[in-house]
Image (tube, grey):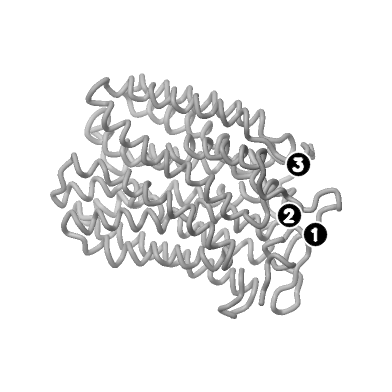
Amino acid sequence: MFDEEKGGVATAERPTLGSDGQRLAAAAPPPAFDPRENPDGGFDAWLVVLGAFCCMFCSFGWINCIGVFQEYYETHQLQGYSPSTVSWIPSMETFLMFFLGPFIGYFFDCYGPRYILLTGTCLHVFGIMMASLASDYYQIMLSQGICSAAGASMCFYPAMSVMPTWFFKKRAAAFGIMAAGSSTGGVIFPIMVNRLIPRIGFGWTMRVCGFLILALMVVANVTVRSRLPPRPKPFHIMHFIRPLKETPYLLTVLGSFFFFFAMFLPINYIILQAETLGMSSRLAEYLIPILNGASFFGRVLPGVAADKIGRYNVMTIMMAFAGILVLALWLPAASNAPIIIFAALYGFGSGSFVSLAPSLVAQISDVREIGVRNGTVFAIISFAALCSNPIGGALITRWDGAYTGLQIFGGIMALAGACTILAARIVLAGAKLTAKV
């Protein structure tokens, strides 16, 4: 049995052996820090999880509701622009949040999370407040697409990077609870926006969201900290390139890249697609909360299962499940019921990516470099996030307003991601089905 708790690749903070007897992981850290001695619980550790939950609520949770803004901007401030043009705003928002990962990860490894979180809180809230005053395309792009996204990135990465310093055996479960914050935000923010805009207007709706984010980030700034002392080091581009020479890491990056092409397409377009099939706007506005509500369980339950049967195993299954759903359920859907069912099931299937991706990276990485290595993964896949929405908009135009091309593209890319993660799993442990990887 390939036992990751007794020297398999999950430790990866010390040398390990794959099925072919070759060493696969990074060199062991000095005796001063053994990740197997992480507390895996206790008041301080769970307090960090609470703060990380708040970070995810305010960063990825906010990004999870950009489909609401896509629909609103197309019918209000930016109604004179094509769907493909409008989609560059949420695409830039998603891209920038992930692209800054290597740089934020580097500063995290050198100086810890404190100053990054403080700066991110200020930028995120300031960008949202400025978006509340915006009316032109360039104003929305600068405030929501760039400033707020940069701040969200600085809230997102420290939360991910502190977790491996507190948890080892329960790492995927802890990541799942943390990532559930993004699902909670993805449920609350769309309902807030849809309910408040008719009552208090777009401007004050954005300000209310900004104040909520500010309050939660105060909690995060107080509670999120790393067990590792700051370790300043010179900046070198090889810190980001060197991990790509490791085959498991490279395949993990590629699998995540392919899946990211598909992941946000239903989130951003399901409301518009449902309305073209006759769903009422009142019902359609609940699709994103349904999707994100189901993703709460998709972030927590697969994480718990991953600690039991292997993180690569569970990630492969969940990616394949999401891709099959797009092709077998969303593509032929022609009425309200299958679309609602798809939203719930897809939320569960795709939601696991947020909790499992960083735990996969931690599994094959030296914990002292976790900030840079996580950041590198998300920076690379950010280009998929940047391009996927405009590609989806272009496919809709190409298919004369139909969503068939977008759905086929999304399903194929999700399945390609599953196959690539499966390849990484085979490299790590061979084709033995019972191996815990």
Q: CA distance from mark 1 to mark 2?
A: 7 Å
Whole-percent x, y for residue 123 in the image:
53, 26
Picture residue at 54% right of the left edge, 61% below the top: 254
For badge 3, the amino acid type reads: Leu
Image quarter where the N terminus lies is: bottom right
- Give the residue type that dot 1 points to: Ala
Say which quarter of the image contains residue 322.
bottom left
Q: Viewer-proximal residue, 106 or 190?
A: 190
Q: Earlier in the sequence, mark 1 or mark 2?
A: 1
Disc 1 and disc 2 in contact, CB within 8 angstroms: yes
Q: Nearer the viewer, residue 410 or 160?
A: 160
Residue 189: x %, y % from top left: 37, 35
Mark 1, other Cα within 10 Å: few <14 / some 14–19 / many ≥20: some
Is 181 left or right of 363, judged from the image as shown?
left
Q: Is residue 356 above or below residue 425?
A: above
Measure the C-alpha gap from mark 2 to mark 3: 13 Å
Label 1 element class: loop
Residues at circles 2 and 3 in contact by the CB criterion of under 8 Å: no
Q: Give the x, y percent position of residue 332.
A: 22, 64
Amino acid type assigned to the residue bearing label 2 in the image: Asp
Q: Earlier in the sequence, mark 2 or mark 3?
A: 3
Q: Which mark is residue 228?
A: 3
Instruction: Give the residue pinned by disc 1.
Output: 27
Q: Residue at x 68, y 63 (%)?
A: 246
Question: Looking at the image, is mark 2 or mark 3 nearer the viewer?
Answer: 3
Which is more toward the observer, 394 or 251? 251
Residue under label 2 = 366
